[in-house]
Amino acid sequence: MTRRFRLEAATRRGEQIAKQYGFERFPIEPTTIAEAENIHIQAKPSDQKGVSGGIIFSGENVGIFYATDIDNDGFQRFTIGHELGHYFLEGHPEEITKIAPMHISRAGFSQGKDFIELEADHFSAGLLMPSRLVKKELLGRPVGLEGILTLAQQAKCSVTAAAIRAAQCSPYPVAIVVSNGDEISYGFLSDTFKSLGKFRNFPRKGDKLPVGTTKDFNETPDNVLRARQACGETTFLDWFDGDKAIELDEEVIGLGSYGYTLTVFSSDNLPDDPDNDEEDEEEARLMDSWTPKFARGR
Ligand SMILES: [Zn+2]
């Protein structure tokens, strides 16, 4: 089973659980689900930096704690969803208790994260933002930032997590880039975006931002801090070194005190052949390694 397939399965499992507990509209409440499973939930100020929460398996009893030092509802909900992933996903309790009865989860753009951490993140994203509800929310809205902000608000999730889910569920090409200063922190491209054509610039951690709206925006730190927005235009050719000059909207929003910026590239042109699977093997491998990271809290 490929990593990508396993992550998609984790997302679906999250969606299933939301449905099983009768959530037919936003927001999905992970604490309600935990209570129904007799899981004890505790808010706990963290004494370790970077710890977002954890799960404890003690015989028949299961407990979840989440950090409260980051005062952000979306962050805490995503964390509880993540810990529920460790409870509901096949193999997770066994994998965790093999090492210790307690598992600590860390937030952020951690590199080389354990695979179960990624799986739990994808579970949480599916739980809090089931594709059926995401599609309903995005329907009739213009592709791009506006829909993402509404989704974040309705689902009570971070803007970044909502952006990734919107890109995953949208039939239109959407690319997400999170940046800090003049550098890219990570990128996520929807399948339809990848089908726009061949391109050489994969947005990767540490890459410098190309000239344009996002780079200009980040040059004024106040823009980021005050969650200002900007909008410009670019092309698939210019930003991604693609083989076509397809026009893209480049919408930017500052994510506040963390110093990160979210950029959403979108086009209302559907690719000629969305099922184009003529990628060569190298490219397919590369795509497979592109697993979105739901930076909790941002
Ligand atoms: Zn975890």
Image (cartoon, helix red, strand yellow):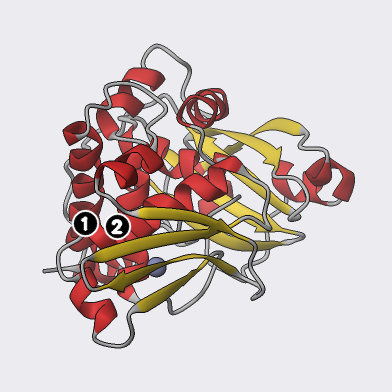
Dot 2 and dot 1 residues touching (CB under 8 Å): yes
Residue 28 position in % (x across, y down): 37, 32
Q: Nearer the viewer, residue 289 or 238?
A: 289
Q: Is mark 2 within 8 Å of ligand 1?
A: yes
Residue at 48% across, 27% down: 151
Residue 131 position in % (x across, y down): 28, 33
Residue at 36% across, 16% down: 139
On screen, residue 235 versus residue 47, left or right, reads: left
Within the image, what quadrant is residue 61 found in?
bottom left
Within the image, what quadrant is residue 170 found in?
top left
How far separated are the C-alphas under marks 2 and 1?
5 Å
- Quadrant of the displayed image that contains ligand 1: bottom left
Residue at 36% across, 50% down: 124
Mark number, residue 88: 1
Q: Amino acid at mark 1?
A: Phe
- Which residue was labeled with disc 2? 85
On screen, residue 126 versus residue 109, left or right, reads: left
Pick out the residue farthest to the left. Answer: 1
Task: Examine the rendering and report whether any part of residue 220 can be seen.
Answer: no
Compared to 264, does 4 lie above or below? below
Q: Amino acid at mark 2?
A: Gly
Pointer 1 local density, CA inside 10 Å: few below 14, some 14–19, many at least 20 = some
Q: Nearer the viewer, residue 231 or 99?
A: 99
